[in-house]
Image: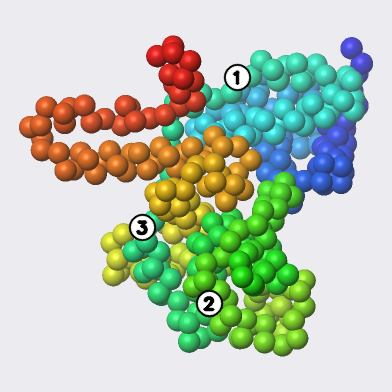
Amino acid sequence: MMKLNDNTLFMLLHDYLKVYLPKQRKLSPNTIRSYRESLELLVDFVKTKKKVLLQDVTFEMLTADIINAYLDYLENDRNCTATTCNNRLASIRAFLVFAADREIATAVYLSEMKKVPVKKLNEIVAVDYMSMAAISAIAEQADADTPKGLRDKFFMVLMYDTGARVQEMIDIKLCDIKIGKTPTITLHGKGGKIRSVPIMECTIQHFQKYMSVFHCESRNDNERLFYTVSYGQRHPLSASCIRLFLKQYGESARQNCIDVPENVHPHLWRHSRAMHLYQGGMDLTLVSQWLGHANLEVTQVYAHADTEHKRKAIAAATPSDNPLYTKLNSERFTISDEDMLKRLTGLR
């Protein structure tokens, strides 16, 4: 077997993260950040486990045993879900595929990686979402008579209406919003994927009021819709700033509305919009397109969550002495692709 230089690992990591992913694959910064975090955590883990300096970590240390130990560390010490562990594992595999293509001597480590099994997903995790009463209560905490309150309120209204991810909200430019007979907004999602989402009339009213305060001067279509001002300069809103004001409004709203959950975060608004669309009769395929999901299986979680919601409502309305009561259990309503396939093909 060809012998590798001690710095081969870090040379290939540099080429992968700095050249291949951004310039050849043209992946989004968020996607690259996910790959980087997975690989950084791995290298740090190997360094600690082997008791070596960071620069002394080599491909030879990336054995199946060390990768398995790394996954156990993620699950047990960092409390990562099986899905997160599998995503980390997929990121490492993707890097090793790249490395094997660039340096044939590393192919043996890709082969070693194939011995590592993915984490078993034992159950479908029901998604958390808010009621309309909770959403309204939170939005009402923003004082629209002040510039900051006006901005925050419109941000919440638009985030709910579009079901956008927090980064998609941050990236919105003035040119992305089209006001006409059918108002729409263009969202720039993961992996450079673009989708157009309709905007409701009430959201347009909030938009026009917001524009009259925050973009009343001559418009630059490439300017960010949402911004903060620091030292006289406009800067895009940061994700941390958004999480902070949502948390604060949530804590304030919870004093008067018991429906408001303890942890109000940006993605909760996306989940809530998706659930409300599905409960309102929108087909899952259309909900998937609305959210910009690459795979319909990801959207399936909303169907499961809604089914569980109905089960609890039925259970609450059914007397305990009813003979049907004992048959009300969540397992009967849990849907998996394998179960569905067996039913469709007659195996069940």
Tell me the residue at 46%/20% (across/down).
Answer: 344
Say which of 191 and 261 sits in front: 191
Tell me the residue at 88%/30% (across/down).
Answer: 8
Count every numbered label the image shows and give the total. 3
**Drawn side of residue 89 relative to residue 268, left or right:** right
Query: What whole-number distance in Å separates the C-alpha atoms at marks 2 and 3?
Result: 21 Å
Q: Tell me the amino acid under the disc marked 1.
A: Pro
Numbered tag placed on residue 206 in the rendering: 2
Label 1 neighbour load within 10 Å: few <14, some 14-19, many 20+? few
Q: Earlier in the sequence, mark 1 or mark 2?
A: 1
Element at label 1? loop
Task: Name the residue tied to disc 3.
Answer: 131
Numbered tag placed on residue 126 in the rendering: none
Task: Give the image quarter of residue 179.
Answer: bottom right
Tell me the residue at 54%/46% (across/down).
Answer: 286
Numbered tag placed on residue 117 in the rendering: 1
Tell me the residue at 71%/78% (across/down).
Answer: 234
Colour basis: rainbow
Q: Position of residue 317 (x, y in %)?
A: 16, 43
Label 3 neighbour load within 10 Å: few <14, some 14-19, many 20+? some
Labels 3 and 1 touching (C-beta < 8 A) = no
Element at label 3? loop
Label 2 neighbour load within 10 Å: few <14, some 14-19, many 20+? some
Q: Earlier in the sequence, mark 2 or mark 3?
A: 3
